[in-house]
Amino acid sequence: MTEAQDPLEEGAFPAESVEGADMVGEFETVMEATESAISESSEPPDATPDIVAEELREGIHAALEGAGVDAPTRPATAKLTHDQTDLLVDLLGGFESRREILEWEQELVIQTVGQLEDEWFTRTASDAPTVAALLGEPWGPCEAMPTELAVEIRRGIVAKDLLPAFHAGHEVARWAAVERVDHLDDNADGDDPEAIDPQEQQYPLMRPAFGEIAGQQESALEQLLEGFENAEALLAWSLQVVGASYAKIERETVTRPYFEQGLRRRLVGTEPSEKDQFIRESWAAEFLLPAFNRAADALGQRATEVTAGQAYHGETGGGSIS
């Protein structure tokens, strides 16, 4: 983790850096090819991205339900696949705000079991062209973002980053996935046991520890973005972050929001200015989400699976992948 900077310092966060406008990472070639194709093509643009995304979501879930036996014997891995599907489709459809991107990333931490690099979360929520592509409109120093180009960049992020991370998440979770076959036993005494529906399960990965930490992380992120009434509330939140990050946030980082007066002024107050909101979102991208990611990674090989009815509701359904 990089050493914290004064968030009010010029260029403290990638979104404020002019150099950030030139960074689209591995997608530079894709962007050039797409821009060329757009300029040469006379074909009408694709259907509205959100309509395509919802059709895709329904189709994938239906295909998963119809694959193999009606009731999976390893429902935990099936649930993970369903939840990952929602996150993938959300990305393809794009987001309405930078805050929505951060909230999506927080759930991504859980559903990838912390298998993305910490820096990925900061880069994705702070690099101007990437944020513009996720929003489907200009953002920060990035003054133009054609719809077709934004769609292609989002597809590239899915192919390059999400799919490998989802694969790695399954590798971590699969070893402890319980095989349940009682519903297939014709010789069982009494009433046939009911099969387990993965989509009706309460916890991510069917692991209560992940449901607990996901709720803590969601709450901590929301409080930071909403702001604090006073310094005492900020200190209490700092303790919550320790638990929500599984103590994977650095001690100096968790105390810095209180001791750095400039940062504290931006965080305390429930009617933030645009600059206040930018600082809060940037601090979450730089420090909070990477710590949450390390927490999920640490928890991944220790959590126990259980069967429990549906109750957990997310927005949708250090790691090793750069």
Image (cartoon, rainbow, N blue to C red):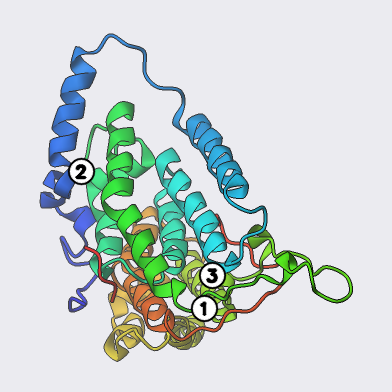
Name the element at disc 2. Answer: loop
Q: Which mark is residue 213?
A: 1
Residue beneath disc 2: 141
Q: Earlier in the sequence, mark 1 or mark 2?
A: 2
Q: Residue furthest top?
A: 42
| Residue at 27% across, 39% down | 153
Name the element at disc 1. Answer: helix
Q: The disc labelled 2 sits on which kind of residue?
A: Pro
Question: In this rendering, which labeled residue sits more in front, label 3 or label 2?
Answer: 3
Can residue 276 be seen here? The reply is: no
Identify the image quadrant of the N terminus.
bottom left
Name the element at disc 3. Answer: helix
Mark 3, other Cα within 10 Å: few <14 / some 14–19 / many ≥20: many
Identify the image quadrant of the C terminus.
bottom left
Measured Cα–Cα span from mark 3 to mark 1: 12 Å
Q: The disc labelled 1 sits on which kind of residue?
A: Ile
Counting from the top left corner in percent of width and height, residue 30 is at 18, 36
Q: Residue furthest front?
A: 187
Measured Cα–Cα span from mark 1 to mark 2: 35 Å
Q: Residue furthest right?
A: 190
Q: The disc labelled 3 sits on which kind of residue?
A: Leu
110 vs 261, left or right, is: right
- Callout 3 touching callout 2 (CB < 8 Å): no
Counting from the top left corner in percent of width and height, residue 204 is at 55, 69
| Residue at 29% across, 72% down | 319
The answer to whether 87 is drawn above or below residue 181 in the figure is: above
Counting from the top left corner in percent of width and height, residue 269 is at 48, 69
The quarter of the picture where residue 314 lies is bottom right
The quarter of the picture where residue 78 lies is bottom right
Residue beneath disc 3: 205
Counting from the top left corner in percent of width and height, residue 258 is at 36, 84
